[in-house]
Amino acid sequence: DLHNIHLDLPPVSTPTDMTEEPSPYRFTAGTAADDARFPVVLQFASKAHVADRASDGAGIALIRYYLEPGKGESADIFRLRRADTLILDATLPELGDDPILCEDVHALAIDCIDGEGEAHTTWNAETDDRRNAAPRAVAIRLELGASSDLNVYETTIALPLWWDEGEAE
């Protein structure tokens, strides 16, 4: 998904004040969530998306990767899900009924790399300190499997295009 992100025009998202609804086009990463039951780990809009429902078609989609508590005895094990929803004037569907990408997730860390090469564990393009900037890269570390035999996967994805802080103002 992140390799296919394309930015054709200046950002549709602009910084909001606290009275406005957040833009669905914003790039966010971290544990803050619109739905407190499921922490949204990564969210972005893309025209290059994979529709996961028969009714979905072409257009700009809001892609959200999020964790939900896994089934079982441990509260420290999660499922990783991926929501892919076309952005329309309607409200977004609730999270929780999306395809499961991984079970037995013990840890998921996402770092957003800024234009200076510094890593940030959270990112919200609409905040004053970000001023619509998109990260230059996203580093992901995923730990999953049985507690006695964890598998660790790491990757860093350089975004094909980005905006530096304040460039779109």
Image (cartoon, rainbow, N blue to C red):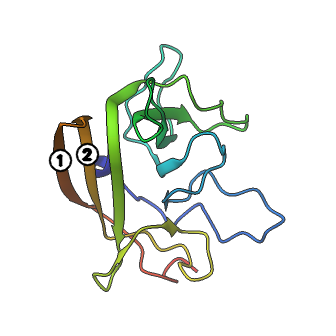
Amino acid type at image mark 2: Glu
Q: Is residue 5 visible?
A: no
Q: Residues within 10 Å of mark 2 (few under 14, many from 20)?
A: some
- Which numbered disc, 1 or 2, marks the residue that appears first in the sequence? 2
Report the quarter where the N terminus lies.
top left
Front one among 1 and 103: 103
Residue 161 numbered mark, or none? none
Which residue is at 66% across, 36% downward?
A: 88
Which residue is at 43% across, 69% downward?
A: 134
The spot of residue 101 in percent (x, y) is 34, 30
The spot of residue 72 in percent (x, y) is 43, 24
The residue tagged 2 is: 143
Q: Residue furthest right?
A: 19
Which residue is at 18% across, 37% downward?
A: 148
Q: Is residue 147 left or right of residue 162?
A: left
Front one among 54 and 130: 130
Front one among 83 and 79: 79
Amino acid type at image mark 1: Val
Q: Is residue 146 left or right of residue 44?
A: left
Q: Vertical placement of 42 versus 105: above or below? A: below
Q: Is residue 67 left or right of residue 19?
A: left
Question: SS of the residue at dot 1?
Answer: strand
Total number of numbered discs in the rendering: 2
The spot of residue 161 in percent (x, y) is 32, 65
Q: Is residue 81 visible?
A: yes
Whether the residues at callouts 1 and 2 have beta carbons within 8 Å, the answer is yes
Q: Vertical placement of 12 versus 142: above or below? A: below
The residue tagged 1 is: 152
Front one among 33 and 129: 33
